[in-house]
Amino acid sequence: MLNLQLSGIKKIEAIAQSSPEYISLSQGALKLGGIPQKIKNHLQNILTTDKTDYYQSAWGIMELRKKISSTLSNKYKKHIPVNQIIVSHGCIGALATFLFTVLDKDDEIIIPEPTYPAYEKLAHLVRAKPVFVSCKTLRDAKNFSLSQNINDNQWELNLEKIKQAKTTKTKVIIFSNPWNPLGLIVPEKTILELKNWCEKNKIYLVIDEAYKDYAFNKNYKSYATLVRDSEYLITTASFSKNMAMSGWRVGYMITPAKLCKNLGTTQDALLNCPNVPAQYAAIYALDHPQLTQSFANTIKNNLDLCEKYLQSLVKQKIISYQKPKGGFFLFLKMNLHQIKKQINFKNFGMSTNFNDAEDLCMDILSKAKVALIPGKFFGKSGAAYLRLCYARDPEILQEGLRRLVKYFL
């Protein structure tokens, strides 16, 4: 019998949502006032017709597939054919459909970590074996108090580690770019080298681009345009992050043409068809890119706000972090030794009975009423870290940061 455990992220978020006294900087959802009202108004008009009332294609409605094709082709100056686009139940639906289609029992999936926990759960769901490869650099392992201003990287996608993890059962490599929870953007040279190696070894490379609209690095590029000329590259994307439509469950994948038929029939078996009303909302969203840009501007300002508030904790060597180049997370390294000294110095009667970052996370939740996520939920390499999501209304984020600083200082 399959026995998957509920994500620890969901458990913490449930506590945060149980009372208005909590501020949630935990679950990775965009909460900036909800879905833009213009999208809702458009969908209300659609709902007066029967367009959304019936089953539609398991590959997604053709109007949306064409819109995705034209939007991406115009943006990236290279044609992406409609027959390589499949609309899905968010990125997770796309990944589940793909893995169910291409994997057999006991096949292996290489997952660089720390990583989005759902990748491991999907591996178990399809009876495959997740193989984790740490992105922690040797330098990071030696230096516990790196500041956000340091030039040395704390994390990197190491191709040699990935190659060493390969076995005869390796069928898939998967990671997000921009990277959840690290905020890392994998260099183009690294991805192209990995892509070529995967093609040579007949391994599928899946790049989850859910956070592509939140790339602060001007050198960032989507790899969707390379799928057309590769039999082993797949990209996924979602309207959950760029349009706050996480509850409506709509995304898509760009896939090699040879897989498109099989992927569609698998999705038909899993879902019958993706959410039809959400697909019509997605069409409108693609026609109004200024809505996405408005969210992106707020997220960038929120990152600046985080850096301002957390500066005092960095100076006290309580936390350190690598400044993210994309996404909307900070992966905070917690100097537990310094934190215990600081809390004892405050002499508030606050407990120092924690042995790892998860204990600290729960203490912050209990006393400061701020929800963060223990880094070990994302993999062993994240055990000394907490993840903070700053995709929140600026006023709420500011109050959460104020409480966090007060907890320590």
Image: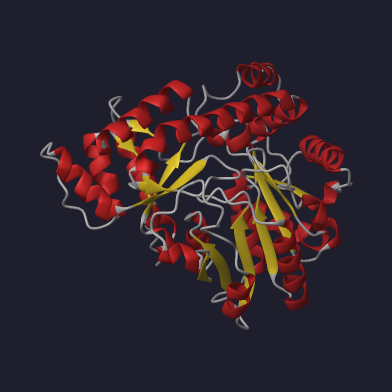
In screen coordinates, is 1 left or right of 178? left
**Residue 406 in which image quadrant:** top left
Q: Residue furthest bottom?
A: 168
On screen, residue 58 versus residue 400, left or right, reads right
- Which residue is found at the position 69% from the left and 16% from the top? 45
Which quarter of the image is occupied by the C terminus?
top left
Q: How is the image coloured?
A: secondary structure
Q: Position of residue 123 (x, y in %)?
A: 52, 65
Q: Quadrant of the N terminus?
A: bottom left
Above or below, 290 against 231 in this view is above
Residue 51 visible somewhere in the drawing: no
Vertical relation: 296 (above or below) 88: above
The answer to which of 116 and 118 lies nearer the viewer is 116
- Identify the residue shown where x is 26% and y is 51%: 338
Work out whether residue 52 or residue 39 is closer to the camera in this orientation and state it. 39
Residue at the (77%, 57%) spot, across then down: 260
Q: Position of residue 91 (x, y in %)?
A: 61, 48
Residue 349 in sight from this viewpoint: yes
Residue 73 in the figure: left or right of residue 42 = right
**Residue 10: image x %, image y %?**
38, 45
Q: How many marks?
A: 0
The percent coordinates of residue 60 (x first, y second) are: 73, 42
The foreground one among 249 and 265 is: 249
